[in-house]
Image (cartoon, rainbow, N blue to C red):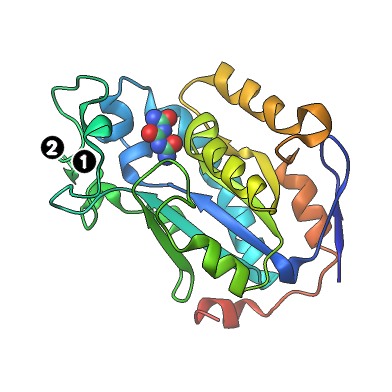
Amino acid sequence: MSLTVSARPYDLVVDPDATALIVIDMQRDFLEPGGFGELLGNDVSLLGQIVEPLASVLWAARAAGMLIVHTREGHRPDLSDCPPSKLARGRLDMGIGSSGPKGRILVRGEEGHDIIDALSPREGEVVIDKPGKGSFYATDLELLLRNGEIKSLIVTGVTTEVCVHTTVREANDRGFECLVLTDCVGSYLPEFHRVALEMICAQGGIFGWVAHSADLLAALESKPQRPLATIGEGG
Ligand code: TIU
């Protein structure tokens, strides 16, 4: 079964059974005060506006039986997987590995590293821990997508011009079709967000497609849904 999503630069046809929803780095460290995002000098409150539309898409994707993949940017406690260049970047007094109000910054297992409660992964959903900005670099994401016969990615999360863009570029070069949902990706820098989205769909869709989540939800409504009770049990 295929669905047609109204998108830019032109409508995108996707098969929900061959489509994964990717939720990138919706971690406390990027969305809440005291985390990595704020330490970089950003106003983290700007990212909060994507949580509600993204939660709706997450539930719709679950109901449609799509593969759901959550990613988290972060490092091993001994930081042995963090390049020295990344540690040094920004000349921060407090940076990756430092102790903050939500534990050590961008370190796996710490409160700040985990995904915000509103978008918590359900049992059975894939969680990819990645050391870089791209979701494919030094992870088994590509293997999981190929084994799942996934052809298209619905891309959401933060930030639009950093981890979302890097992931879309990596995915595009690997032959995956990417649809980026404009209201489900966010940036600390509104102008970068706007231009990053334009960069994806310019030149005939040089990296992929962009659409509002309402356009995806409208397309999904035509697909028979699984009973919500089944989803709640982790199915
Ligand atoms: N700083 C910034 O905009 N983003 C990141 O460091 N990581 C992600 O985008 N996840």
Classify residue 13 as left or right of residue 157: right
**Horizontal and vertical percent position of residue 53:** 61, 46
Label at residue 26: none
In the rendered image, which quarter contains the N terminus? bottom right
Q: Residue at x 22, y 49 (%)?
A: 107
In the rendered image, which quarter contains the C terminus? bottom right
Alpha carbon distance from label 1 to label 2: 6 Å
Q: Residue furthest top?
A: 191
In the displayed structure, 100 sits above or below 230; it is above
Question: Is any part of residue 105 visible from this angle?
Answer: yes
Q: Check disc 2 and report the residue beneath it.
A: 98
Q: Residue at x 42, y 63 (%)?
A: 127
Q: Residue at x 60, y 40 (%)?
A: 169
- Is there CB contact under 8 Å for labels 1 and 2? yes
Q: Residue at x 84, y 32 (%)?
A: 204
Q: Amino acid at mark 1?
A: Ile
Question: Is any part of residue 121 visible from this angle?
Answer: no
Classify residue 15 as left or right of residue 159: right
In the displayed structure, 140 sits above or below 80; it is below
Asked which secondary structure carries label 1, the reply is loop
Say which label, 1 or 2, has the lower sequence index. 2
**Horizontal and vertical percent position of residue 12:** 84, 49
Q: How many C-alpha atoms fall within 10 Å of the one at disc 2: few (<14), some, or many (≥20)?
A: few
Q: Check disc 1 and report the residue beneath it.
A: 105
Asked which secondary structure carries label 2, the reply is loop
